[in-house]
Amino acid sequence: MSAEEREAFRSNAEAKLTDPRFATRAQQALQELDRQIAAEAAALSEHVRSLPMARRVIEAFRREPMTATQQRLVRVLLDHPHSTSEQLTAAMGWDGQTWHMHFGMMCKDREALLWPAEAAIRRDSNFYSGILAIFEDDRWWTIKPEVAEGLAELGIRPAKVGSK
């Protein structure tokens, strides 16, 4: 079932929960749908766990392609290694540390297809940006070499001559 078909199925079943004639069967259908989704997620997680990092990157972004903005986030980092969040944000044409927030969300959305994020040092959360990037000296961002290798295979490489 596609994601759209699952969503339609879920909506239909949830609508029937309020009708006593269908409530039991609707609840069973929702539970089965949830079990199926969980089983597929576990199988996918097991599959990617056995792959080298570069292959995981390829698999993650083939299964869940980047948006145009996400491609820009990655390209800005590839084109500006050893840059601060502010510098990367400015390269996007944005303000503040917006690059960091969007990059972290992109990583978080694919965490199950990549590898777990480490705990953040300065806040009570996970460090999602650290899935794909290295944060050096609490200041400088660089793409992880294995990630760059996987991205290159997807056709995403630094644009500047001499960029890593």
Image (cartoon, rainbow, N blue to C red):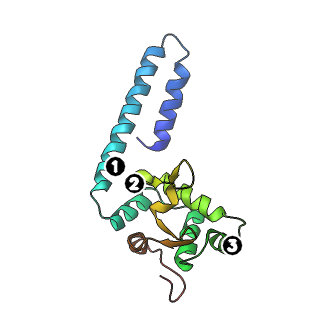
User: Residue 147, image x and y in percent?
Assistant: 41, 69
Secondary structure at numbered mark 3: helix
Which residue is the extreme one toward the top? 20
Which residue is the extreme one toward the right? 95
Seen in the picture, residue 42 relative to 153 is either above or below; the reply is above
Depth check: give the residue in front, 18 or 87: 87
Q: Specify the quadrant that holds the N terminus.
A: top left
Secondary structure at numbered mark 1: helix
Q: Amino acid at mark 1?
A: Ser
Residue at image mark 1: 45
Residue 148 location, quadrant: bottom left
Secondary structure at numbered mark 2: helix
3D distance between C-alphas at marks 2 and 1: 6 Å
Q: Nearer the viewer, mark 3 or mark 1?
A: 3
The mark found on residue 113 in the picture is 2
Considering only order in the chain, which callout, 1 or 3, is on the residue closer to the N terminus?
Answer: 1
Callout 2 touching callout 1 (CB < 8 Å) = yes
User: Residue 30, image x and y in percent?
Assistant: 44, 27
Seen in the picture, residue 140 relative to 53 is either above or below; the reply is below
The mark found on residue 90 in the picture is 3
Tell whether 110 sits left or right of 89. left
Q: Which residue sits at x=66%, y=64%?
A: 97
Q: Amino acid at mark 3?
A: Ala
Q: Which residue sits at x=56%, y=64%?
A: 70
Residue 62 location, quadrant: bottom left
Considering only order in the chain, which callout, 1 or 2, is on the residue closer to the N terminus?
Answer: 1
Tally of numbered discs: 3
3D distance between C-alphas at marks 3 and 1: 35 Å
